[in-house]
Amino acid sequence: MNQHSPIKGRGSLIERATEIFDFQAALRGRAAPAVDVPADAPPPPPMFDPAPPAPAPAPVMSDEAPIFRAQAWTSPAQPVDRDRLTEAGFLVPGAPVTAMSEEFRLLKRGLLTHLQDNPRGNRILLCSPHSGEGKTFCAINLALSLAAEQDREILLVDADFGNPGIPETLGLQAGPGLMDALADPLVAIEDCVLRTDIPSLSVLPAGQRSHADTEYLASARTEMLLQRLTEGRPDRIIVFDSPPLLAASPAAVLASHVAVALLVVRADKTSESALREAAALLKGGAQVQLLLNAVRYTGGARRFGSYYGKGEAG
């Protein structure tokens, strides 16, 4: 083969290499033969290149967008004037159960069921064909009844821009409101919300009057602001009080932004023709339900409120 000693046998590559190189000598601690190295010789190269440092782990990227959660209201809480509510015949928080409070309990139970997972959001509109039929009365009472729920947050919106009155009725000091936030992008709608001393009830005033209120409500900004008020808060419900349907156009536009429209009619006043005309303006939007106001019961088995006055358990 060459000048080396011939290899005996046909062992494995390792066995054949061992016959040429005495690896066992190193294992037994034998020193290798001395080799003269010149003093000016360069240092021997390293036996192997050091491993490069491991790269830093890449940040884990999530495909899920961060969940936006609507802000909590931060204004100082204003006291609701309970005496004024009592004098005007409204529900009063903490007062004994009455026939009217039971009626609104029944009303809200059905509404809460309908609002559950509704794609149009937790928004309710109260409107009427004409003024004087009780829409504001019903809107305030419904909001008060809903605010009594243990796991709900209610925002009562005064959207009757031509004749606002909810803050005054509740004894609150109003400031900028919905129309200001719609007209001016620099106005944060969250800053317009009035907190009350009823923990679950807040109020959004109407704001300044505008000749373009219908156009502002029909703009994309309206839906964007409403989303900001409720996004990430399924427990937050918005109740709108609107202008009369047959007297001003904003009510019909507002109906396109809500899940349920309660059409308030007065039992002793609203004509059938007015009811039909008002209902026609609400077509194509929210689910429309009729709410009969100023009803006088003369018979039947319903005696709501009397049960709680018996003073007996069971």
Image: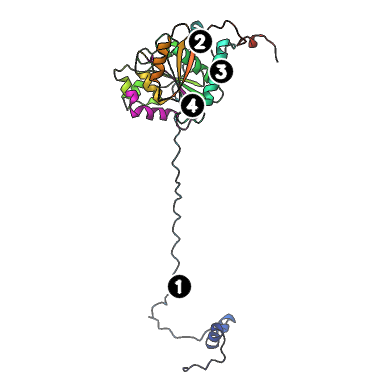
The residue that label 1 is drawn on is: 48
Residue at the left extreme? 211
Q: Is residue 100 left or right of residue 286?
A: right
Q: Residue at x 55, y 85 (%)?
A: 18
Going from N to C along the chain, the mark reached first, 1 or 2, is: 1
Q: Residue at x 56, y 7 (%)?
A: 297
Q: Which mark is drawn over residue 36?
A: none
Q: Mark 4 vs mark 3: give the one in front.
A: 3
Q: Which mark is drawn over residue 90?
A: 2
2 and 4 marks in contact (CB < 8 Å): no
Going from N to C along the chain, the mark reached first, 3 or 1, is: 1
Out of 15 and 129, give the one closest to the viewer. 129
The residue that label 3 is drawn on is: 106
Q: Secondary structure at mark 4?
A: strand
Disc 4 residue type? Arg
Q: Which mark is drawn over residue 236?
A: 4
Going from N to C along the chain, the mark reached first, 4 or 1, is: 1
Please report the bounds of the magenta region as a residue range.
Answer: 216-245
4 and 3 marks in contact (CB < 8 Å): no
Up-down: is 21 above or below 105?
below
How far apart marks 4 and 3 lie (CA) works out to 19 Å
| Residue 110 locus on image (x, y percent) | 54, 22
Q: Secondary structure at mark 1?
A: loop
Q: Mark 4 vs mark 1: give the one in front.
A: 4
How far apart marks 3 and 2 lie (CA) works out to 17 Å
Up-down: is 35 above or below 192?
below
